[in-house]
Structures are given as C-alpha cells and as structure tokens.
Image (cartoon, coloured by chain):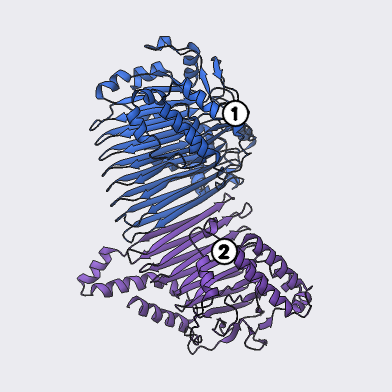
Amino acid sequence: MSTDNFNDYVSSSFERLERRLNGHVNGPLHNLRRRALRQFIDVGIPTRRMEDWKYTSVINVINDAQFSSEKGAPAPAPAALPNEDVYHIVITPEGLDSAPFEADGLTVEVLTDELVIADERVRSTIGAILPIDTTPFVAMNTALHTTGVVIRITGNVTKPIHLDLIAHDASPDPLPSPRILVLASEHASATIVETVRSNPAAVLLPVCEIECQANAHLHWTRVLDDANNRHISAMAANVYGNGSVTVTTCIVDAAFVRNDVVIRLLEPGAQGFLFGVSVLDGQQFADNHTVVDHVMPHCHSEELYKGVYDDGSTGVFNGKIFVRQDAQKTTAYQSNRSLLLSPNAQVNAKPQLEIWADDVKCSHGATTGALDADAIFYLQARGIPKAEARRLLTMAFAMEVLERVPVESLRQSLERRMEQRLSR
Amino acid sequence: MSNLQPTESESTALDDVVQGDYKYGFTSNIEQETLPKGLSEDVIRFISERKGEPDWMLEWRLSAYRRWLDMTEPTWANVKYPKVDFQDIIYWAAPKKMPALNSLDEVDPELLATFEKLGIPLEEQKMLTGVAVDAVLDSVSVKTTFQEALKEKGIIFCPMSEAVRDYPELVKKYLGSVVPVTDNYYAALNSAVFSDGSFVYIPKGVRCPMELSTYFRINARNTGQFERTLIIADEGSYVSYLEGCTAPQRDENQLHAAVVELVAHTDAEIKYSTVQNWFPGDKDGNGGIYNFVTKRGICEGARSKISWTQVETGSAITWKYPSVVLKGADSVGEFYSVAVTNHHQQADTGTKMFHLGKNTRSRIVSKGISAGVSQNSYRGLVKVARNAQNARNFSQCDSLLIGSTCGAHTFPYLEIANQTATVEHEATTSKIGEDILFYCNQRGLSTEEAVALIVNGYAKEVLDQLPMEFAVEARKLLAISLEGSVG
C-alpha cells in the first residue's frame, strides 16, 4: 500500500472522529488533533531512509493491520499480574472500561476538551511533553486517539496501578491509539504496570506523557508477553528537581515492538532510569529507542538494555544521551548487551553520546556475542547437561534486568514465562 | 573547577599561544598555471590532456563526472558550514616550471625554501632519515627521491599521473576497486577531477625497506586539492606509508576531497599513518580547510592486515572515515585516531569495519579532544555479515572536553548478523579530573604542563602506533593545538 492510501485512511478516520463530536470542533484538544493530522500527512509513515527508522521497517506491520481479515481469539485476561491487589485501569479503543475514580492519592479521568479547558496543568502538558513532531506515530496518535486518560498521582499510592491496554478483535479500529497522561504531584509516588492484550489484526499505538514534579517518584513497568503483540509506542517523561522516573520494558514475547522512550531531566537532582530486556525468537522484532536529555546540572541517568535473540529474530537498540551546555556535573551511564542464540539472529545497535558540557561523566558500552563457551564447559564439567547450562546462563543474563521489576508477583510470573520460553 | 582557571598573567601567556598566528601560514610565490574557476566536461578534458592521459582515463573521469552531477551532497554529518560552491573552485593548478630532476639542486629554490619553513627539508630527510619523499606541491609531483633504491626491489612508488602512463594495467585493475566512483559525492567528484597523488605497488614477498612518505600541501589560492592515492601490497609484502600535511593561511575556505585506496593481498600488511594539520581557520572561525576525504582499504587475501593511524589537529571541517573491508579469512583491520579540535573547528570522523570473512578481527581506538567552541564527533560502523564466522571487534572511543563551550559526540553503529561474533564497544566522555590536575600542581607542574602531560598520556595508545619521525611531529602538534585552552 502506498503512503497516499494510508494518508486517506488516516484522514477518513479523522473525519469519522470529527462527526462524532456533534459540531464541537473548536476545543483546544480538537485543534491539537487537527495540527497533528496535518503533521502526519506532511511526514507520512516513516521509511528506512529516515535515520531514526534506519533499522526498523514499519510499513508491512501497518499494512497487515489494515488488511488482515484474521480475527484472533478474544484477548485473554492478563497473565502478568496474578492475584495482585491493584488499581485496575482498563483502556479499550472504545474508552475507559472502568469508571473514573479517586482513591488513595490517585485520580483517573477521561481526557476531554472540557478537561483541557478547565485544567491548566493538563493544558500545558498534553501534546507538549511529546510534541507532535517527535515521531509520525505520535502525530497519528494525537490526531486519532479515541481514548484519552488522565492519571493524577497526588500522594503515595501504595498499591500498584495496573494499566490494562486492550485491543480486542471486536474493535473497529485496526490501529487503536490510547493516549495516557500521567501527572505526578510533588512528593507523590506510584508504581505503574502496563500490560497489553492484543490480537493479530491490530497494531497498538499508545502514547504516554508523564510529568513528574519535584521529589515525585514513578516506577513504570511495561510488559509485552503475548506473541500477538504488535506495538509502536512512544513515551516521554519530564522530571523535575530530585524527582525520578524509572521505565522498565520487559518484552517476553511480542511479534513487533518499537518503543520510543524520552526522559528529560529538567531540574537539578532529577534522575532517570531505563531498563529493558527482550527475549525474542521466530521472526520477532524489537526496537528500543531511547533518549535521555540532561538539561540541568547535577542530574543522573542510568540505562541498561539486554536482549536475547533466537531463530531469525532481530533486536535494535538506539540510545542517545544528550547533555546540554548547562548540565554540568552530569553522570550518565548506558549499557546495551545482546546475546545471539542462533546463526540467523541479528542485532543493530546505535548507542550515542552528544555532550555539550565539559564537567560530566558519561559512558556507554555495547556488546554483542554468543554465550561464553568456557562458562558452558564449566557447568558441563560439573554434570549439568549442555542445554540446561545454556538455559541457566541465559536466564542469569536476563535476570539482571528482570530483578529490577518492583512488583514481586509480576517479577515471579515474568521469570516463569521467560524460563518456559527458553526451554522450548 | 576553580583551580582550572588560569590567573591573569597565565591567561595572557595562554592567549599568546592560543591566538597566535597559524605557524605554517605563508604563501610561496611559485609561478602558477591555473584554469579559470568552475567545473565542466571541458575542464576535465583539459586536466586529462595536460596530464597526457590515455583515452580510457578520460572516459573514466567523464563517467564519474556524469554520475556526480546526479548526486547530492551528504548532510548527515554533525558539522555545519556554508554550502560549497563547486563552480567557484579552480580545478587545475600546476607549478609552471617542470624541470627534469636528478638532484635536489634542480628543484625550484623557492619550493625548497617552502619545505624548509615547514621543517621538512628534503635534503635532511634524504640524508638523515632515509625516508623517500614524494613531495606534492598542489597538483603535480615535483620531486621523487629514493626511486632508484625502491626500483631495485621492484617497488613502484610514483605519482599517480606517471602510473597511469607507465602501469596502465595495474591502475585499470585497482583504481576505483575499493572506493567505487559512485561511493559518495566527494569520491565521485575526486574521480572526475583528481589532480595527482601517489601510486604504490609492493611486489610479492617484498618488505618495503623504508617508510614511504608524502607531504601534501595546498598552495595556490582557491585551488581545490583532489589527491588520489592507491597502494597495492601483493602477497606477503609489507609497506608503511606516511602522509602529513600543513597548509598556508587563507581567508577563503578551501576544499580538500581526497580518495585513498588500499589493497592488501594474502599475508600482506599495509600501515597507513596520517598527521593532518591543514589550516584550521583563525580563532574566530574564518577560513580553514574543508577536509572531505574518503579512505578505504580492502583486506583481499587471507591473513592480510590494514592499519590506519591518524592524528587530526587541523582543518576547519573534517569529514573522514578510514575504513577496512575484511574480506580475506583471518584478516585484521585497525584504526587508531587522535582528533583534536580547538576554536571553531568541527570534526566528524571515525571508521567503518566490514567483517565479511571468517575469523576476521578489528580494533578501533579513537581519542577525541575538544576545546574552545569546537565540535568533535566520532562516527563509526562495525558490521558483521551473516557469513563472517568468529568475527571479533573491540572499539574504544574516549572524548576529553576542555572548556565548557565545546562538544563531544559519539555515534557508533553496530550491525551484527552472526551469532559467533564478539563485538564490544566502549565510550566515555569526561573532562580532565580536578584531582589529577591538583596532584600535578602539588608536585610543581603548572596547570598548562599538567594538561599537556595528561593529554599526551591520554593519546599515547594512538601515538605509539606512529612511526618514530611522525610520533615526534604529532606530539608537537598536540602541544601546539592544545596549549592555552585550559580553563
């Protein structure tokens, strides 16, 4: 399909959306949508000729989503969070599946024009933390999102917040685009777990914007554990004085993933942590695309992305550390490690440092290789069969990221999931 | 960083050094024969005719030119500069006097004086160091020494224009085989208008008895310099080639678009060293050389080795990625680089290692030092192809920042499609530690001396790769480029 056809599809989707508004087309949110639509039409679907999409071809994924007549089974209940007492927020293409609520320093609302008009903070953050020109898919999400949710964290939220994104087969939209805005007030803290239930016909295009005010702490864990998952997401966090945002991406199973994560450290003492683990096989594909932007001095960031690639799977990592001229006394560390388990697996890595300040300590490291033959031999010499030895070492490799998952039951279920995958 | 701030008297002394005139900025008044500015097929025909080239060479140039017309300038590098007007460049300039030379006495005395000012008198080089010098002044090689000694071994070391005439079979076979005409915009331009350069052929099993060296020098006003170098090391041979440059001070930007091709056959080894000190522009960023160079070597045969070493201190804009294609089994590629940028200089440099054969190894050591308001980028690619079993790469890219207004950037690309590959990349960016400076101060070294000491130690791993006579020059260059940038 040519880009023109796709533009038609996006435009007609937009018109459908507009018709549902009964003439309420002059609100600030709708104006933002309109600008985003123009932006998307201008740029179109990214191609591999664009530097940021050099290793990632999305056109086929998008095409499949549109023309697939295949209807998958209804999305299963999320396996990732068994028996955990959580605040459950279910987001479907039709809207928020649970009623808006308020409890325990947590407020959940639906993003509407009225809310944008009434609330200064929503107005100043929506479309500002992730501007529409960040990626074409951010523009598309901004133009077409059918479900917008505003999550406010005003205190210490003790239970994990479970964001349950669903793209089930009854959906009329093959490209559901949920929009999430998280506003954490000063001294607030929360743990958020995002899971996805998808079907083979849909590609999920979520966009999350996070504002983390001074001394607030957010821990976001994204879980992709379904072989049907096709996921092109963007997330950005603005972090203020002494606040911290941690994003842990666990790709235990997924057909196609492109994750853009941006963390901006905007006041002294802000911290950003990015962790990720991908375990892929078959023809699976995962691209982690990160930017850590050190704007102010005395900020700290750490990044660790690991990948285990079997069969004909492909892993991509693009990590940029940006240190602006004012950001003296920055410490920024980045590490990317990949394990290739099959002759047909492939890794493309592009760690980047852009440093404009002198009093900084920044480093990145990237390694790619197979399992250490000596280590396997060591285990074999102690009576552990080769296959088991390989599994053990691979698990140990992945655990360095998994053990950072803050919810105990989630960590255990992810560990089990990973063990199952590695022993098949 | 208070102890890094120089005192007033110190900074005056520093200013003297930093703001001092470019040491090698002078013009030698050798009569020039030049073409009017601009590029067209006629200009290429003229160049080809003046050089007495055969038809096939002219055809090759013309086809490169036609391809070039369809190409666009690359814009992906992390450098900013006013667009080059390719019609505002003189594509041919040659010293008018072309004496047949048997001894140094016959060389234009003014030319000799020029080299003397540069600190590389041919005489001394010849007598003391035993280095054969193919001195290129602008476009035509005017003096070649030691040719006789090399001839005995069967080594061909001559200007490219001579090689086109005398060894057409070799040139036809290898020219453009490593860097194809359409490789990139500047390579295509070079293929169309290349003026001269060096041609080296080392026969089977011969170990070149001396370092081969060429000193390039841009001399004529508004003259683009388009060197073309081709080095072929046949089976089991070894050659170490040196290239160094200084250029006189000019106000207008000058373009330098060279192409260097290396071919190493089975068991052969080529060591290519560069000390680059083109005019970097004045302290306000006026003038300076645009250095857009394509350098690539191919390890054609098994167990062959190509090693690039570069010390880059000059040029206003550098755009340079010496690469190695590791085709033969067990072949080795190396890249050692020190890139220093000061004032308004911008450098986007690095390497590419293509692992195609089995058991190939590569090693990248890049040390960037930025000062003033300069920008220094490392950009590198390590590619392991599907069939490159047991490839091994290690990359180390360190950046040192001196002053808070400069930038250091790293853009490594790692593309790994083979499970047995082991690829490691490491990069660090930092300034010189205050504790280290304090330690030196405490022991009686001034901050200046301490920085020089630390930087030299930082770059040692690369400088050690240079042949003796270049190592000395390189250390001097590092000192000149950096002294006074502390603070």
Mark 1 is on which residue type? Gly
Left or right of residue A172: residue B213: left
**Relative to B255, does residue B354 appear above or below in the rendering?**
below
Residue drawn at x 56%, y 78% is: A191
Q: Bin the neighbour count of mark 2 within 10 Å (Cα to Cα): few under 14, some 14-19, many 20 and up.
A: few
**Relative to A247, does residue B215 appear above or below in the rendering?**
above
Q: Colour of chain A?
A: purple
Q: In which quadrant of the rendered image does the N terminus of chain A lie?
A: bottom right
Q: Colour of chain B?
A: blue
Q: Bin the neighbour count of mark 1 within 10 Å (Cα to Cα): few under 14, some 14-19, many 20 and up.
A: some
Residue drawn at x 33%, y 32% is: B240
Q: Secondary structure at mark 2?
A: loop
Residue A76 versus residue A60: which sits nearer the camera? A60
Task: Give the labeled residue for mark 1.
Answer: B38
Q: Are marks 2 and 1 on the same chain?
A: no
**Relative to A258, does residue A86 appear above or below in the rendering?**
below
**Relative to B276, does residue A51 appear above or below in the rendering?**
below
Q: In which quadrant of the rendered image does the C terminus of chain A lie?
A: bottom left
Q: Chain of mark 1?
A: B
Residue B96 location (% of width, % of height)? 51, 14
Residue B73 versus residue B457: which sits nearer the camera? B73
Q: Looking at the image, can residue B472 be seen? A: no
Task: Give the labeled residue for mark 2.
Answer: A2
Mark 2 is on which residue type? Ser
Furthest residue to the top?
Answer: B105
- The mark found on residue A81 in the picture is none
Q: Chain of mark 2?
A: A
Residue A34 versus residue A246: which sits nearer the camera? A34
- Give how far apart the Cα atoms at labels 2 and 1 are: 42 Å
